Each structure stands twice: as C-alpha cells, then as structure tokens.
Image (cartoon, rainbow, N blue to C red):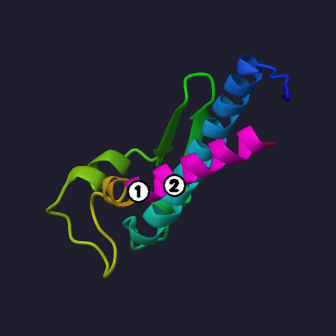
Amino acid sequence: MMTKKVVWTGKVATVRERAGAAKGLRRWAEHVLQQATVIVPLAPSGGTLQDSGATDVDAGRLEASVSYDTPYACIQHENMTYHHAPGRQAKYLEQPLNASRLTGLEILAEEIRLSLEG
C-alpha cells in the first residue's frame, strides 16, 4: 500500500483564483473597449469621445468598468434618434458587452486556470 501526503493550500488557491479573476476582468474590459472603439460615434471635428474610452478594475471587489468620459457620452449612448456616420451607433458600450458574454466567460476561466496552475 502506497501512502501519499496531501498538503491543503486553500488560502493560496483562493489568492491565485482572485488574482486570475481580476486579470480576466481586465482582459474582458479591454476587449469590450476595443469593440466599442470601432462603433463609438465620431464628431465631425474628430474622435474626442472615442479617445476618452478607458477601463478600470477593482481587484478587491472583482468589478470592472468600461467608460467614455465626455459631457455628452451618456446621451450619445442612449439617444437612438441621433444619426451617426456609417458603422457608428448609439449603445456603443451595451452592444459589445452583450455580444462578448461568452468570450468574457472564456477569458475569465482561462485566467483563473492559468493562475491556479502557476
């Protein structure tokens, strides 16, 4: 009969899992921002709204955000009656986020797995 020693590393696994989840959230947020950048409305004078796009991750709370920071970002996002250049649209954050749900879960799973293996 062979005996094996098992060492429980629950705290280490939890720390690695959370680190992987935070990294996965960052990658997912960057993915959404990349997709939004392609469809965010452009002003005739340039891409001020487009250039204001940013992501943020709160690793402690495991929350991520993707945002655009101009005084008119919210109204451009919500007002479906505005006319935009071809390929540009309202709901420029909502649409990429909804479309990326499966991709986002795959990214999260991959980063958590990699962190636990490391």
Front position in the image: 8 or 29 = 8
**Left or right: 3 in relation to 79:** right
Classify 14 as above or below 86: above
Classify 97 as above or below 34: above
Front position in the image: 25 or 9 = 9
Which label is found at residue 102? 1
* Residue 26, horizontal then vertical, whole percent: 61, 45
Q: Mark 2 highlights which residue? A: 106
Classify 97 as above or below 9: below
Residue sitting at 37 percent across and 50 percent down? 73
Secondary structure type for disc 1? helix
**Left or right: 22 in relation to 77:** right
Give the quadrant of the N terminus: top right
What residue span does the magenta drawing correspond to?
101-117
Q: Quadrant of residue 84?
A: bottom left
Q: Residues within 10 Å of mark 2 (few under 14, many from 20)?
A: some
Q: CA distance from mark 1 to mark 2?
A: 6 Å
In the rendered structure, are the residues bearing label 1 and label 2 in contact, judged by CB atoms less than 8 Å apart?
Answer: yes
Residue sitting at 32 percent across and 55 percent down? 98
Residue, far front: 1
Looking at the picture, which amino acid does disc 2 mark? Glu
